[in-house]
């Protein structure tokens, strides 16, 4: 029924819909539900003692700053720390090119606000992160999707697209242990991508929430690092990072690294959203990290998630039939399943919830439709025993689907 306020909604507001993922997070609150839906870190991985001690130090020693308004760009000591972190990742940028955001999700919204007009072309992976799609819905972009294989984005298909004359506003990708598939863009393709981007002046948004969650070897060079190396400065790439997977998502502290010429516009756009991120959370994040906590803390997280990935892969191998396939991620939080073509995973979810197990249907990650027989599983949050039980429940639900 129309009301006074619904009659006043903007065109963009009418494109805003709920996220399948956020709706499913309510399911996780049911104690008997095994949820593979959200990208939740394991609570036992939170550095609770260190965060508690950091919060106490901040409130005792720096309360006048931590409880006050601060600059839109972010808490200066934290930004200084982030310059060191980015330099260690091969992206040497000055403090002025780093903006602290309310998680990387806010950065996605700011990027949409600045760079997407109705009908503007944006290139994304297929499938892609649904949070980005939700952030950009009000700006009504036109999406072109590029397929993924075991080595990540099809760079040759991107080259053909650019050769055809298409000029997108930007390419968006999750470069390592991609959400939702767990796939990582290979080193060879990273080099090919940044050379292609330089040739066609293609802006790239590199989202990197999971890069530190590798289970063997180490990090591949960031696409942003290859950009800085090739151009002598950050030119093609805008980089998004977050503490949500490193410390705790409840802090809502992320950061955006941008080429110098657009920093002011990004800051002005952020001012209109929230004036600044919470000073207290930023100060706690800095105080927690400044003495090398991340280097000490990350091996433990990797060990726990590595075990849980292996448990889920083994359970899938044991309980799923040969007509179901899945990715084998080398890190991150997610495994991507492809089911037989006749299975609709949205319908499967209804059955699965009756069996007290949840996942995210794959169609949510396809901006132009498709993916009806795919789904995403998270392995970082549930215990190994509940992972095995959850996969068994999922198999029972799958067996009940019509053929």
Image (spheres, grey):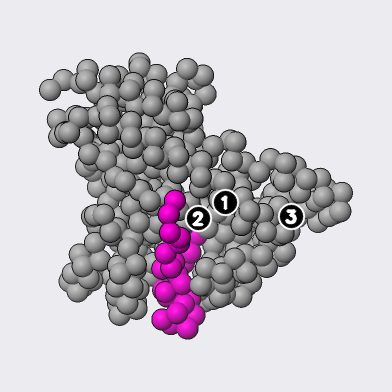
- Quadrant (top left/top right/bottom left/bottom right) for the C terminus: top left
Crowd class of label 1 (few under 14; some 14 to 19; many from 20; radius 10 Å): some
- Label 2, on which residue? 212
Residue 320 spot, x, y in % from top left: 24, 29
Q: Which residue is rendered at x = 20% and y = 29% of the image?
A: 321
Q: Along the polypeptide, which appears first: circle 2 or circle 1?
A: 2
Q: x, y (%) of residue 352?
A: 33, 21
Separation of disc 3 and disc 1 at Cα? Answer: 17 Å
Q: Which residue is mark 1?
A: 298
Number of residues whose C-alpha sits closer than 10 Å to that of mark 3, classed few (under 14), some (14–19) or many (20 or more):
many
Give the spatial CA distance, label 3 vs label 2: 20 Å
Q: Considering the numbered disc 1 on the image, is that residue within a helix, a strand or a loop?
A: helix
Left or right of 80: which side holds 22? left
Query: Is the Cβ of the residue at disc 2 closer than 8 Å to that at disc 1?
Result: yes
Tell me which residue sits at (52%, 68%) in the image: 89
Judged by depth in the image, the label closer to the viewer, 3 or 2, is: 2
Q: Position of residue 14 (x, y in %)?
A: 39, 41
Judge whether residue 20 can be spotted in this image.
no
Q: Which residues are magenta?
A: 215-240
Label 2: which secondary element: loop
Q: Is residue 235 magenta?
A: yes
Q: Residue at x 52, y 58 (%)?
A: 241
Numbered badge on residue 287: 3
- State the separation of the CA atoms marked 2 and 1: 8 Å
Residue 231, by quadrant, is bottom left
């Amino acid at each position: 029924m129309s009301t006074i306020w619904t009659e006043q909604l903007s065109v963009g507001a009418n494109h805003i819909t709920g996220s399948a993922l956020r709706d499913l997070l309510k399911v996780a609150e049911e104690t008997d539900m095994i949820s593979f839906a959200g990208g939740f870190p394991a609570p036992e991985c939170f550095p609770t003692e260190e965060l508690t001690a950091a919060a106490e130090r901040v409130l005792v020693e720096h309360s006048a700053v931590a409880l006050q308004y601060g600059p839109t760009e972010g808490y200066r000591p934290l930004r200084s720390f982030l310059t060191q972190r980015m330099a260690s990742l091969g992206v040497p940028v000055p403090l002025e090119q780093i903006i602290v955001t309310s998680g990387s999700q806010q950065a996605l919204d700011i990027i949409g606000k600045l760079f997407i007009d109705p009908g503007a072309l944006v290139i994304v992976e297929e499938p892609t992160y649904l949070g980005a799609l939700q952030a950009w819905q009000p700006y009504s972009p036109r999406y072109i999707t590029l397929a993924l294989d075991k080595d990540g984005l099809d760079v040759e298909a991107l080259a053909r697209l650019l050769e055809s004359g298409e000029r997108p506003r930007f390419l968006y990708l999750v470069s390592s242990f991609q959400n939702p598939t767990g796939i990582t863009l290979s080193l060879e393709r990273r080099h090919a991508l940044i050379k292609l981007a330089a040739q066609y002046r293609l802006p790239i948004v590199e989202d990197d929430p999971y890069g530190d969650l590798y289970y063997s070897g180490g990090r591949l060079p960031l696409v942003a690092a290859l950009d800085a190396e090739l151009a002598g400065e950050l030119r093609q790439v805008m980089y998004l990072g977050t503490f949500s997977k490193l410390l705790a998502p409840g802090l809502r502290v992320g950061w955006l690294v941008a080429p110098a010429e657009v920093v002011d516009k990004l800051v002005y756009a952020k001012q209109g959203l929230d004036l600044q991120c919470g000073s207290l959370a930023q100060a706690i994040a800095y105080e927690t990290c400044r003495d090398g906590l991340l280097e000490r803390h990350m091996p433990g997280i990797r060990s726990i998630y590595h075990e849980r990935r292996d448990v889920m892969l083994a359970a899938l191998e044991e309980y799923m039939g040969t007509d179901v396939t899945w990715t084998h991620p080398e890190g991150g939080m997610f495994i991507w399943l492809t089911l037989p073509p006749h299975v609709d995973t949205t319908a499967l979810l209804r059955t699965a919830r009756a069996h007290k197990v949840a996942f995210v249907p794959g169609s949510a990650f396809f901006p132009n439709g498709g993916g009806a027989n795919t789904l995403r599983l998270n392995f970082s949050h549930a215990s190994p025993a509940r992972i095995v039980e959850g996969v068994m429940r999922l198999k029972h639900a799958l067996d009940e689907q019509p053929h």
